[in-house]
């Protein structure tokens, strides 16, 4: 049947892997060429146009609904907190000093950390990896600590540079380990990353103990948006640029995720794409670690949840990954602000609990399907 299909449709032989029938025959329905399709079987241009409009609307309305829901969460975040914005003196000044920067940070960190997790899963061909299960976050924290020890008066940009540099090195070390591991099951890969992260975290703790910076290290890793105010969050706009680049390079990441042999056979420089992906992951992780702290399991939860409902089409899943990432972080932050008000629970604590439950659920679900 496949051979007959390719004989009738020579374009299908050159279609990229993962392309659906609509790519080969735009406008086609149920395996038929476009000229035989249409509203009511008329095949006329008006019927075909109406069908295309309805099809686009059916595809777009869930995404529009998601955008509305996320906007509602963002607006809610702006008005949740102990400080009385409307009644207190200088309330609106406080609104723009703290609430707006905090909400922007929630949006940027949530979207880009989720996208970074998705890119890392493609690069490793494993659904259970993301910056906190590969040691990247621990390496970023070590870079932050080393920078503060070497340059005590380091600016936030200097700390970001050290964190990004160490995150890049640590991610490359992880990939180097993967190249030398013969058994690359879905469970072995994240176990290797978690072990590497534990070793790096232990060294960071020892170094902090020896230099009386243990408390500072705990604050850095406590992933909280409490300290995000105007003048301290602007570095996060760097990760916005990285997010845009991930959208532009989505097709290349998809092909690279099919493996080095397939990527090379169709003319893609697999090594260059891999280095680009690792660099993006390092920048996102380093910047978020410096400004916010650790956001555990975010890059694991979001891509897997989106994939369960929408499949594995990276190009169409990216907007959903962004929206769900923003929603998860925002909901966790709102819970952290209200659960023991007037105090706050770090968002990393809530994310860690939710992420651990989802991680175990994914492992159990995969075992049932093996």
Image: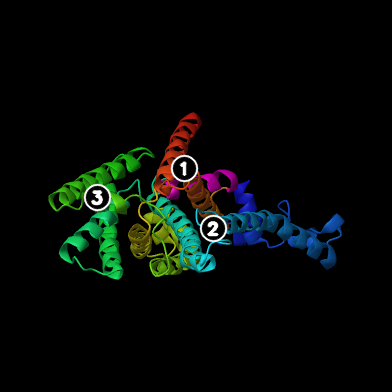
Residue displayed at 77% across by 58% down: 54
Residue 277 is situated, as x and y percent measured from the top left of the image, at 38, 61
Q: Which residue is mark 3?
A: 215
Which of marks 3 and 2 precedes in the sequence? 2
Residue 306 is situated, as x and y percent measured from the top left of the image, at 55, 48
Q: Secondary structure at mark 2?
A: loop
Can residue 173 be seen here? The reply is no
**In magenta stretch: residue 306:** yes
Residue occupying the far top of the picture: 368
- Distance from the alpha carbon under mark 3 to that under mark 1: 23 Å
Indicate which label's residue lies in the foreground, 1 or 2: 2
What are the residue bounds of the magenta stretch?
297-310
Can residue 238 be seen here? The reply is yes
Residue 83 is situated, as x and y percent measured from the top left of the image, at 50, 57
Image position of 140 (left or right of 29): left
In this view, the residue in front, 227 or 91, is 91
Relative vertical location of residue 356 with respect to residue 295 in this rendering, above or below: above
């Amino acid at each position: 049947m496949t051979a007959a299909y390719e004989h009738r449709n020579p374009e299908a032989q050159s279609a990229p892997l993962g392309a659906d029938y609509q790519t080969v025959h735009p406008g086609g329905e149920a395996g038929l060429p476009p000229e035989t399709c249409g509203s009511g079987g008329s095949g006329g241009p008006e019927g075909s146009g109406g069908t295309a409009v309805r099809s686009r609307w059916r595809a777009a309305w869930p995404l529009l609904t998601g955008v509305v829901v996320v906007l509602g969460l963002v607006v809610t975040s702006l008005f949740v907190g102990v400080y009385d914005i409307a009644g207190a003196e200088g309330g609106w000044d406080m609104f723009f000093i703290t609430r707006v920067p905090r909400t922007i940070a929630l949006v940027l960190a949530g979207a880009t950390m989720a996208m970074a997790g998705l890119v890392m899963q493609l690069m490793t061909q494993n659904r259970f990896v993301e910056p906190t299960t590969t040691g990247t976050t621990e390496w970023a924290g070590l870079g932050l600590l080393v920078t503060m020890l070497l340059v005590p008066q380091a600016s936030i940009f200097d700390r970001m540079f050290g964190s990004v540099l160490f995150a890049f090195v640590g991610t490359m070390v992880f990939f180097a380990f993967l190249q030398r591991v013969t058994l690359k099951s879905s469970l072995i890969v994240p176990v290797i990353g978690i072990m590497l992260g534990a070793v790096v975290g232990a060294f960071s703790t020892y170094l902090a103990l020896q230099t009386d910076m243990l408390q500072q290290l705990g604050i850095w890793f406590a992933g909280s948006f409490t300290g995000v105010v105007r003048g301290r969050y602007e570095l996060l706009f760097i990760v916005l640029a990285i997010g845009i680049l991930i959208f532009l390079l989505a097709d290349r990441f998809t092909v690279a995720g099919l493996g080095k042999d397939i990527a090379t056979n169709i003319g893609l420089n697999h090594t260059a794409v891999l280095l680009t992906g690792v660099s993006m992951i390092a920048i996102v992780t380093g910047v978020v670690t410096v400004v916010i702290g650790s956001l555990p399991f975010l890059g694991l939860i979001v891509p897997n949840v989106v994939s369960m409902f929408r499949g594995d089409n990276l190009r169409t899943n990216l907007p959903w990954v962004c929206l769900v990432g923003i929603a998860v972080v925002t909901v966790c932050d709102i819970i952290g602000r209200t659960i023991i008000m007037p105090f706050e629970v770090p968002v990393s604590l809530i994310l860690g609990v939710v992420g651990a439950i989802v991680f175990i659920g994914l492992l159990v679900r995969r075992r049932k399907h093996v």
